[in-house]
């Protein structure tokens, strides 16, 4: 979690959740996940020609940086953040954002 930019206090909070044991059972796979982290393949994104929305919650530095780079690489991409949303956004907030995006396109 810290590799992805999650602050230490949030990691501590996650350790106290009821989901932690299930997450911990996946810990051995994290080395493989870590291999995948790194700069996004921006050269591949430049070929995208369809309307694209790059959307994050604004909560994690790693993801924000990657999303910024992806949005900059995709011609005409729209970059948005959903303030006050976590890993799982409120469906009402997400639906309103998607509706607005698709109506504009």
Image (cartoon, helix red, strand yellow):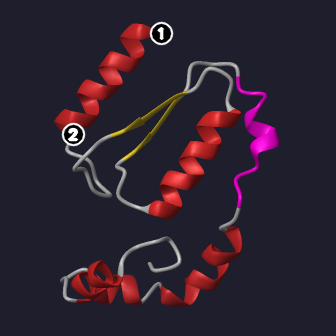
Which residue lies at the image location 26% right of the left edge and 47% below the top edge?
Answer: 89
**Residue 79 falls left or right of residue 42:** left
Q: Residue at x 65, y 67 (%)?
A: 37
At x 76%, y 49%, the residue is 41
Residue under label 2 = 91
Residue found farthest to the top = 104
Percent across and percent down for residue 97 are 30, 27
Relative to residue 63, is residue 96 depicted above or below?
A: above
| Marking on residue 105 | 1
Q: Residues within 10 Å of mark 2 (few under 14, many from 20)?
A: few
Q: Is residue 46 magenta?
A: yes
Image quadrant in which you'd find residue 28: bottom right
Q: Secondary structure at mark 1?
A: loop
Q: Which residues are magenta?
A: 39-48
Q: Nearer the viewer, residue 73 or 34?
A: 73
Q: Work out whether 94 lies above or below 57.
A: above
């Amino acid at each position: 979690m810290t590799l992805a930019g999650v602050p230490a206090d949030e990691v501590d909070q996650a350790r106290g959740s009821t989901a932690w044991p299930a997450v911990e059972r996946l810990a051995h796979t994290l080395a493989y996940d870590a291999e995948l982290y790194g700069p996004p393949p921006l050269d591949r994104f430049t070929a995208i020609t369809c309307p694209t929305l790059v959307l994050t919650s604004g909560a994690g530095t790693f993801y924000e940086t990657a999303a910024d780079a992806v949005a900059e690489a995709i011609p005409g991409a729209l970059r948005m953040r959903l303030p006050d949303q976590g890993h799982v956004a409120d469906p009402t907030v997400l639906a309103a954002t998607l509706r607005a995006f698709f109506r504009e396109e």
